[in-house]
Amino acid sequence: MLFDKNQIHTLNDQALPDHRESFEYLSQRLSRRGVKTNELIKKIQEFQVAIPSWALGTGGTRFGRFPGGGEPRSLEEKISDVGTLHALNAGSGAISLHIPWDIPDNVEKIRHHAAANGLLFDAVNSNTFQDQPDQEFSYKFGSLCHTDARVRKQAVNHNLEVIQYGKMLGSKSLTVWLADGSSFPGQMNFRKALQRTLDSLREIYDSMPSDWKLFVEYKPYEPYFYHTVIQDWGTSHWLASQLGERAYTLVDLGHHLPNTNIEQVVATLMMQGKLGGFHFNDSKFGDDDLTVGAMKPYQLFLIFNELVEGMEDPNSSNPSPAWMIDASHNLKDPMEDLLQSVEAIQLAYAQALIVDRLALENARDNNDPVLAQEILQEAFRTDLRPLIAEARVQSGAALHPVSVFRKLEVRKKLIRERGSKSLATGL
Ligand code: RM4
Ligand code: MN
Ligand code: MN
């Protein structure tokens, strides 16, 4: 660790009187509304979001990349960075690996290092959207959907290898995102490509350990621009249903066409017990991978409103989804960006938790859209930042994570240690 945890506490102490005042005021207001602040804090503390191993470095577009320096040069250093984030916010206690960007060479050492940083290994991610130097066949025309059985076999085997790594580290799920698709009308037979994808996924599913889950991610376009084989939640849901009960759909917030009602997608999937994974980010146009909550915080709240309804439903068969941030940091310091994302997620979650669900159901039953809106926006417009801060302080983390990150000069120290030209693996 680049700093002593006591340094966080010292910085907290300076800001504590101001915080106490706003927290007191907020908890009094909440308790008048029948909300139990302690239970809320506990839920926020328990909610942990995984950080993907590829998000600690600077992201790029196809036009360029502007690295800010001090990027992690190895998996160990990526784990250390997630450990730093977790020390600051107590909300990002897991890391999600992308193979082969981050192959754990020395499993014991990696496991130990993660545990020392208080981190678990979340879903492992396969990568059949890029060709690797030592690979026999190209994925230029697809992987699990490829017309050539040898390419499909290679892609299936890669996924099995990823599962092996995950098993050694203690992961319990595999996320498959396929770039597979076509860029020109007529290029690919939709039906055959989907059938081949299902067959390949079945091979992977059947080889998974019995306590593992498979998450099938969807995306409407990019890198191909005419069609993707798994274009939407319906296709993913169909595949997951065909595969079996341990296969689920993964929703990535950036993987929808403009104006898609994502909250409805979430509700429908949870109703059927099929929402397995969740990738957070925000966007204006497409898969922009911006900071969570930076663009459409109300939509994020509405999505959480459905997530909470599903999570709190005692009759729901939906398992607790695997939460992950899937963003790309082109302008901001990746670590500051991730701290902002985690806070936005916690805020939206907490806001959804204070929705007066009983009153909302009554308004719905009485067909009263005015009241329904009042109830939702009452929760959304309550400033819960002091509550999130209190949850952090009670967990021994920072009152103001970004400000502590800056005051402790974390980036400067990382640059001193790793250099200004270090490059992280990833996109
Ligand atoms: C994709 C998708 C996947 C992620 C890759 C890097 O757009 O979101 O989840 O693994 O990007
Ligand atoms: Mn994703
Ligand atoms: Mn994406």
Image: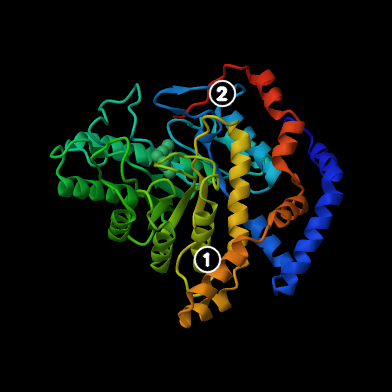
The one of 418 and 299 positioned closer to us in this rendering: 299
Q: Can you tell which of label 1 and label 2 is closer to the viewer?
A: 1
Which amino acid type corresponds to the residue marked 2 in the rendered image?
Arg
The answer to which quarter of the image holds residue 140 is: top left
Q: What mark, if any, has residue 275 been given in the picture?
A: none
What crowding class fits label 1: few (fewer than 14 Cα within 10 Å), some (14-19), or many (20 or more)? some
Q: Is residue 326 above or below residue 210?
A: above
Residue 93 rendering spot, x and y as whole percentages: 62, 46
Q: Is residue 392 above or below residue 274?
A: above
Q: Is residue 332 above or below residue 346?
A: above
Q: Which residue is mark 1?
A: 311
Q: Quadrant of the N terminus?
A: top right
Note whether residue 209 is visible. Answer: no
Which amino acid type corresponds to the residue marked 1 in the rendered image?
Met
Residue 132 rendering spot, x and y as whole percentages: 35, 25
Residue 141 rendering spot, x and y as whole percentages: 22, 33
What crowding class fits label 2: few (fewer than 14 Cα within 10 Å), some (14-19), or many (20 or more)? some
Q: Which residue is mark 2?
A: 73
Q: CA distance from mark 1 to mark 2?
A: 38 Å
Asked whether mark 2 lies closer than 8 Å to ligand 1, one says no
The one of 259 and 120 positioned closer to us in this rendering: 259
Q: Quadrant of the C terminus?
A: top left
The answer to which quarter of the image holds residue 318 is: bottom left
The residue tagged with tag 2: helix, strand or loop?
Answer: loop
Residue 161 rendering spot, x and y as whole percentages: 39, 38
The one of 405 and 192 positioned closer to us in this rendering: 405
Q: Is residue 65 above or below residue 221?
A: above
First in sequence, mark 1 or 2: give its number.
2
The residue tagged with tag 1: helix, strand or loop?
Answer: helix
Q: What colour scheme governs how the chains and residues are painted in the rendered image of this protein? A: rainbow
Kindly identify the residue that appears in the image at 33 percent across and 51 percent down.
Answer: 205
Kindly identify the residue that appears in the image at 75 percent across and 37 percent down.
Answer: 404
